[in-house]
Amino acid sequence: MTGTIVTDAPLKTPDMRLDGKTAVVTGAGRGIGRACACAVAGAGAETVLVSRTESDLDAVAAEIWAAGGIAKTLVCDVSDLAQITDKIGGLDRIDVLVNNAGTNAPQMLVDVTEENYDKVMDLNVKSAVFVAQAAAKKMIDQGTGGSIIHMSSQMGHVGSPTRTIYCTSKHAIEGLNKAMAVELAPHNIRVNAIGPTYIETAMTAPNFANPVFRADALSRIPMGRIGQLEEIMGAIVFLASPASGLITGSSLTIDGGWTAQ
């Protein structure tokens, strides 16, 4: 009796390059947004930097070009839905969206003002929804799939004093992430989130200069240190790239173990 022997094809390490892709990063002028932009640009994507502040965008674009990448700037206030439709929706192509723009206004619950509630929820949730909508429409029209990455937080998984409204907004992003993933899967559009712990940036530096705040934060992180911008970048490239081709509706916490407790 004879038969054909079937052997497994050689395995190849999945590709984490983004050459030929267009990646849009909101809030790209500073901090985590800058790191996300440099990450996708470093992986080969033509990167569209989105923010309200042109000077910040120009500085990040210059950094990307100096490193051999390609970057364009798009001055856009993502709290303005008309600008989202006109500017982001008007782009020629979107293969990757890093939905990063956000804010915080720490207050104890009993002190929360309507102004700060609206400030946080409007940018962190409402703007995120409609930026994602604009990108999803573009990806569906293109018919070639895509990757949407929401900037969540460890605070989308836990609670914390003075972060009531921020936690509310990031828990909302976690729900949005899952619902979008299910809805967009038939279009081969993957939707995921990352949830960083405290990351050292110019914005967070004053908090960490307070020894009480720093000691409390470190006590909650089993790895015993504050996160660095570079530690965000690998996760962004992974979720944007073909290497995560079967991952959707997931949230990757980059928190040194904070939410594992």
Image (cartoon, rainbow, N blue to C red):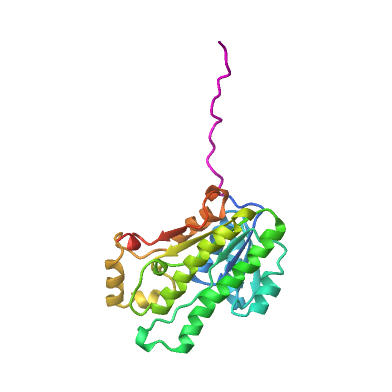
Quarter of the picture holding the C terminus: bottom left
Quarter of the picture holding the N terminus: top right
Is residue 36 or residue 158 the one in the foreground? 158
- Residue 7's spot in the image, x, y percent? 54, 25
**Is the residue 86 above or below the residue 143 in the image?**
below
Residue drawn at (36%, 84%), measured in percent from left and top? 109
Viewed as shown, does residue 134 lie left or right of 251? right
Viewed as shown, does residue 231 lie left or right of 123? left
Residue drawn at (41%, 60%), measured in percent from left and top? 254
Is residue 202 or residue 196 the one in the foreground? 196
Residue drawn at (59%, 60%), measured in percent from left and top? 183
Residue 7 belongs to the span the image colors magenta: yes
Residue 35 shows in the view? no
How many numbered discs, if any? Answer: 0
Is residue 105 or residue 64 the one in the foreground? 105
Q: Quadrant of residue 148?
A: bottom right
**Is the residue 240 above or below the residue 202 in the image?**
above
- Residue 125's spot in the image, x, y percent? 52, 74
Viewed as shown, does residue 247 lie left or right of 86? left
- Residue 225's spot in the image, x, y percent? 32, 63
From which residue to which does the magenta span run? 1-16
Residue 145 belongs to the span the image colors magenta: no
Q: Quadrant of residue 227?
A: bottom left
How would you classify the magenta stretch by its main secondary structure? loop
Residue 153 shows in the view? yes
- Residue 97's spot in the image, x, y percent? 59, 63
